[in-house]
Image: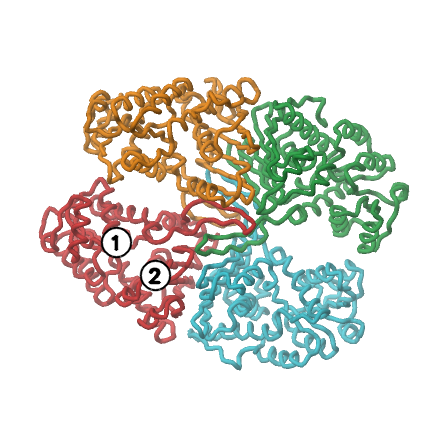
Chain colours: A cyan, B red, C orange, D green
Amino acid sequence: MKVALFGAGRIGTVHAASIRLDPRCELVAVTDVVAEAAEALAAQHAIAVKNPEEILGDRSIDAILIASSTNTHADLIEKGVAAGKAVFCEKPIDLDLARARTVQAIAAKADKPIMLGFNRRFDPNFSALKAAFSGGEIGKGEMLAVTSYDPGPPPVSYIKVSGGLFRDMMIHDFDICAWLFGMPKFVTASASCLVDPEIGEAGDVDTAVVTLDYADGRIATIRNSRRAIYGYDQRIELLGSDGMIEARNVLENTVAKSTAAGTVSAKPVLFFLERYMRAYAIEWSAFVDAVLDGKPVPASVADGVNALALAEAANISLKEGRRIEITADMTGR
Amino acid sequence: MKVALFGAGRIGTVHAASIRLDPRCELVAVTDVVAEAAEALAAQHAIAVKNPEEILGDRSIDAILIASSTNTHADLIEKGVAAGKAVFCEKPIDLDLARARTVQAIAAKADKPIMLGFNRRFDPNFSALKAAFSGGEIGKGEMLAVTSYDPGPPPVSYIKVSGGLFRDMMIHDFDICAWLFGMPKFVTASASCLVDPEIGEAGDVDTAVVTLDYADGRIATIRNSRRAIYGYDQRIELLGSDGMIEARNVLENTVAKSTAAGTVSAKPVLFFLERYMRAYAIEWSAFVDAVLDGKPVPASVADGVNALALAEAANISLKEGRRIEITADMTGR
Amino acid sequence: MKVALFGAGRIGTVHAASIRLDPRCELVAVTDVVAEAAEALAAQHAIAVKNPEEILGDRSIDAILIASSTNTHADLIEKGVAAGKAVFCEKPIDLDLARARTVQAIAAKADKPIMLGFNRRFDPNFSALKAAFSGGEIGKGEMLAVTSYDPGPPPVSYIKVSGGLFRDMMIHDFDICAWLFGMPKFVTASASCLVDPEIGEAGDVDTAVVTLDYADGRIATIRNSRRAIYGYDQRIELLGSDGMIEARNVLENTVAKSTAAGTVSAKPVLFFLERYMRAYAIEWSAFVDAVLDGKPVPASVADGVNALALAEAANISLKEGRRIEITADMTGR
Amino acid sequence: MKVALFGAGRIGTVHAASIRLDPRCELVAVTDVVAEAAEALAAQHAIAVKNPEEILGDRSIDAILIASSTNTHADLIEKGVAAGKAVFCEKPIDLDLARARTVQAIAAKADKPIMLGFNRRFDPNFSALKAAFSGGEIGKGEMLAVTSYDPGPPPVSYIKVSGGLFRDMMIHDFDICAWLFGMPKFVTASASCLVDPEIGEAGDVDTAVVTLDYADGRIATIRNSRRAIYGYDQRIELLGSDGMIEARNVLENTVAKSTAAGTVSAKPVLFFLERYMRAYAIEWSAFVDAVLDGKPVPASVADGVNALALAEAANISLKEGRRIEITADMTGR
């Protein structure tokens, strides 16, 4: 399966390695608006730099991987579908929910798999949690709590184009809740700017709690902070009628030192590349399974629209100081 | 210091033991509407059964400990104050916020200490957490999360007179939030009946999440369930600008067994008497310090009014589906 | 059951509290060569100070608890037996194995229970481990490892009369091995003085490893140090054919703090009084069960002789640099 | 740097992947006595199958990696040195100590790096432990305990050619002790056959404890079992004058499930390929650093001789039931 890569930045580089590790794939081309980035990645993998049109027009290329900037995602998915390619696209589809729904309509008619990069679904810890839950090991789900803190805030220049915390950061956690519990009935958001005043000046928040109320009484809470000085804090906790299941943090190492000051163990691994390194490889493998073996796509465009709908509701909730009902027309299904 | 006990039930029995353990105290009398209960406790400790009037009229008695049913608390505090006694009263002051405020007004004029039984403030784990936080070890507080699950629901007969989950169960967690973060600006509640349908038929909930928004942007969340099949789950987690501090569960023992099924460690200790056994003794000792040494009362009537105001706000929030503002006139200060 | 106490020092004080807590017992008298100590303890519990002869001659006294210095144990056990008392004696019986065997011969003919204070057998963690092991939860036992480090060395004056590390400190661990695995075939000791040179000058060691080889191939190891700067380290680990079971340390609290330096959790509780506080109460209760209800004594004089035989063998092994065979005539059974 | 691989079995395959991952290396040839194995590996990496003579005679090849059977190691190291190659060889050098010493003498005169595959030195957990210890974080070392259990015994056919538990399995742990504490003065072994009677019939043991006594009083203990039903148990614990440092197990995932049966967390990862996956890559990288940058070899032939000397001493100790002194002429330095 021949693959071309759109975007040679940090996440594109990670995906290139995943493609190379999968013996069923051949990485054949890369494109990037920053020519130097494309050339460096091409040199590293001994592949060609091409422009987007060349890639889309090359009938020997089976799949494209979109890891370019967010504002290009929707267009590239549509062009990839039109060119008959299988498409893997980083989240989000678009910052605009209406635009994402247009993509969804087009995706619905595509005959090749389209998958979104919700990498956390493929983390071995989170998928072990889901397997135990789905297998009934803790009975019926009741309360879900997702903790997701970044080690430190990104530059304000990034914040300004990010779409805001709910669409940029909590989007992953909305997806985790939808993955485990489905779509809620109400979204209620609390948020503030406690970490970096410049983030507030840019109109965004850096600290947030969102509560999701489900029609059947289940409740999910998500906590986000742009700064946890001890590392990348990524946990899930799920209370059910027959028990509780947690996915705890992945630590840098297993060393513990005991002195008069207590016992010190290691911090969580620093950031998403370390934490989700294995998840990225498993995610790509699942996409190849979908393309080559016809397996269902484990993270669809509809899932992307759902997560975006929750982010939009959270933004409205925060602005208006009230809970927002999720109606059928807002979701991706 | 001579002490008389009102209430010879489960919690009265615990307090009797605490009084006996403190060498500065002498337990001299007990009273209970159930004569057999009073007599059994009196026999165990070789003390007299008296009626309330005898106790209040006995000038040799320095302090009374009120562990009788909730609907007697307010009256007994007032009578104790009028009789010139130091008063220790189990939470809550009353199920009615207005009535609690009347008590507070009277308490404000009392010249002997009046203390409320917010036992969790005296748990060595929680107080170690507070000491570290107050000592600046994790910087400025940002997000607080209190998890508090009972091992199983009480009988519905109890639920019916309990005042509801927010006033009966979450009252402790409201106090913990106020103890660590002060009084919030907004209260938003989500809740449902997932554990026992009879609780719902009795008009109460058994599963709840409450979010407290503070004027300066801090956020606290409380999660309650009437059932955690693995035991009494009592945790606090506090994110600050310089780190995170947690108080984890107290387990039955330190044994871990590793087999082909994984490593099994013990459950949390079963319920509040086991979990807070040490806290009850420390709490009583703090009251005696206040009476004998003039130290400040570490859990005041105002604290009780505050917790009750948050519970009342949560009830309104749940009923009306909106967040409730905590105004100055609602609080105990 | 009326009880008199020999020894009003640190451990006698602990036992006095255990006696007082058991509603089946009445503490009636105390004796100590240090008059002030006896009087202080007597005043605290409102009991009489008597001399040993008065206690032994008082037919209303059912049991004696021997917590006086080691060199008085053997005599007092014999006198207690002769006076028809039930006897509880702190370990060890005597520093001299031959003398201990004489006591054993006399004890064998006593018609009242005689019990030794091997407190660790009553630690809830260790007894949960033993229950799981005896219940077959990890199959057949194969390797046992006991870790036992004191927080810091005692004064050299104590070392000089202690009988040496094997008889004073490791005696407990020998008993734990015998309790879990029975008596071994060979004892091999390694030891040195690494903590305090004065201990070496006094002819003792402060760091030791002993290996016990069993006739059927099982192996136990004991590690002792007079100093673990992080606290009182008391662990057991047992590998079996179907799994492994551990009793981990008891920590000061459950608080964990995460910062840029990692996650710090609490140290083990400081020393034996804190660590084995509950064990002392359970131990006493087991003695009362033996006296009043005829239950078997859970730590017998024979157990004491066995532990002492292993200590003696370790001393010889260390001196001669070879493994020592435990023959039938060396043991307490 | 062009590399040729001797041995296309399980460990050869792992090393081939490490070579491929290092951008400084090119894997150019493979050889194996099993032609099919060589061809499969060659096909996977698009390289040539050659015979040993071709590889040794090819002056464009800079380094050889010896992952063939143990009985070929010594000869191949010598031939590699003679051919002017840098040599990386899996442990052990040889099952015979005298033969290993001959190799050492030849290695001493080689002008290219020769490195032994003591993979555990490169485990990130163990190297973090060593860094903390070397950095003085726990003061002066006093007691070291290495626990190393395989998940299950190998086939008896393997046992018969393995050289026995001490040379085949505990060799790693001897090296860890020498790496952390240096060479001891005495070796004392206890061992038995508890796991599989066929291992005993083949003249080997499957359960063993070895104590290493150091001239300055430090003591190390190693525990080995061929079977830990819960997984691959690989731990180090080191007590020092200022604290204790442990490297705990690496678990399959971070999921914990709490039910009425307690809290279950995951087992250790299954076996050495999973546990030491990262170590193998880091190890290879260290060899390339030595070859290309002249850095010191972090695991030398002398280290291999030392570990073998300890294994030989353990065998004698077990046979003769006494401790064995390690004299200067027995070691690799």
- The quarter of the picture where residue C42 lies is top left
Choose the circle earlier in sequence order: 1 or 2. 1
Q: Residue D331 vs residue D35: left or right? A: left
* Residue A319 showing in the rendered view: no
In the rendered image, the vertical position of residue C222 relative to residue A27, given as above or below: above
Residue D194, image x, y percentages: 59, 37
Instruction: Give coordinates of residue A111: x percent, y percent.
Output: 70, 78
Q: Position of residue D69 (x, y in %)?
A: 78, 40
Compared with D320, B148 (above or below) is below
The percent position of residue A137, horizontal first and vertical second, equals 50, 61
Crowding near pointer 1: few (<14 within 10 Å), some, many (20+)?
few
- Residue at horizontal 45 percent and vertical 59 percent from the top: A243
Nearest the camera: A258 or A137?
A137
- Chain letter of the residue carrying label 2: B
Q: Residue under label 1, please give it.
A: B10
Left or right of A69? Residue C41 is left
- Rendered-image quadrant of the C terminus of chain B: bottom left
Label disc, if present, on residue B174 of the rendered structure: 2
Where the N terminus of chain B falls, by quadrant? top left
Total marks in image: 2
- Using the numbered discs, state the Cα–Cα distance from disc 1 to disc 2 in whole angstroms: 23 Å
- Name the amino acid type tagged 2: Phe
Name the residue nearer the viewer: C218 or D276: C218
Do marks 1 and 2 share a subunit? yes
Q: Secondary structure at mark 1?
A: helix
Comparing labels 1 and 2, the label whose residue is closer to the camera:
1
Q: Which mark is residue D220?
A: none
Does residue C296 appear in the picture of this structure? Answer: yes
